[in-house]
Image (cartoon, rainbow, N blue to C red):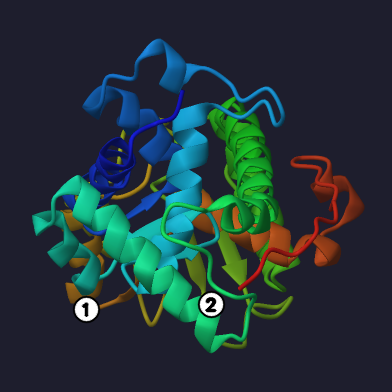
Amino acid sequence: MEIPTARRGEYLQTVFRIIEKNGGSLPLREILVEMPKSLIFNEYEAGHYEKTGYVRWRSMMYLYSIDCVKAGWLVKNKGTWSITEEGRKTLQFSPEEFIRIATQKYREWKRQKDFVELVAEDERGADIAEREATIGYEQAAEIARNEIVEHIRALNPYEFQDLAAALLRGMGYYVSEVAAPGPDGGVDIRAYKDPLGVEGARIKVQVKHRKDTKVTNSEVSALNGLLRNGDVGLIVSSGGFTREAVKEMRNSNNHIEKIDLDDLIDFWEEYYDKLREEDKLLLPLRRIAFLAPNK
């Protein structure tokens, strides 16, 4: 039994619609949550391949997402998938046409890169074998990322606040204050560029640890009202930010930055080696090597 070509096209076009509905970019883990809400998978599609153990529909989605990247329709960056303007135009195609054109563009990319001789239209064995390393890498990366996300979401608000303070220290800032439990006057963390706080701007940080609740524009306005004399505002939110909140930051008369959950994980990985040993215990990581997929 094989998943029909048109059905594979449905998978990817559904992915594109989910991404477009969410502003053009979305973490892969959220796409995977939304997919079963948008498509009904039969028992075979929801089953696992014996060789790899991967879910069939997910494997097909990963496989043809590679074609979409090479076609210039999709961009992948640190676990976030973004649709391009050219990608949006492909939603007008039939699902079968979508896959046919994506496959054609992938093979054109291969030819330009002096890869092996192109296979016939109905013989994708060599292509699929070549991509297994990429699929395996992406699925392993997805599992690892999800474990990190769940670890962070399981923290209580004050542990998450400590995590944000630890990250700032790892980035080279001096954290002068982390609010104790109870009323904090609207500022959870205060940080400076130097130990005495005489060089550069003072950073006032609000930390929001709410899994399913995004920071709103009114919360951005509240922080803006606390900034004085060149202060920089920063909001660290595990639940993300509404579009209105992001717009409020851009239009603010003060400098306000944001760190969402994906930003926090990316920064934590980037600065991990510079963290204090006791801070690493808040979110301990171990690097694992994988065979690099073809670019």
Name the spot of residue 92 as percent of width and height, x first.
Answer: 9, 57
Q: Which residue is drawn at 68% across and 71% down?
A: 173
Name the spot of residue 205 as percent of width and height, x first.
Answer: 48, 57
Would you say 215 lies left or right of 179 here?
Answer: left
Most foreground residue, 135 or 238: 135
Q: How crowded is mark 2: few (under 14 residues within 10 Å), some or many (20 or more)?
A: some
Q: Which residue lies furthest to the top in this view?
A: 43
Name the spot of residue 138 as percent of width and height, x first.
Answer: 61, 49
Kindly state the secondary structure of the residue where label 2 is placed: helix
Q: Residue furthest right?
A: 277
Asked if the residues shown at circle 2 and circle 1 are in contact, with their CB atoms under 8 angstroms apart, the answer is no
Query: Disc 2 or 1, which lies upstream in sequence?
Result: 2
Kindly state the secondary structure of the residue where label 1 is placed: loop
| Residue annotated with mark 1 | 253
Res 212 seen here: no
Name the spot of residue 99 as percent of width and height, x first.
Answer: 31, 54
Would you say 9 lies left or right of 154 here?
Answer: left
Residue type beneath disc 1: Asn
Report the mark closest to the observer, 2 or 1: 2
The circle drawn on residue 110 is 2
Most foreground residue, 293 or 223: 293
Most foreground residue, 27 or 154: 27
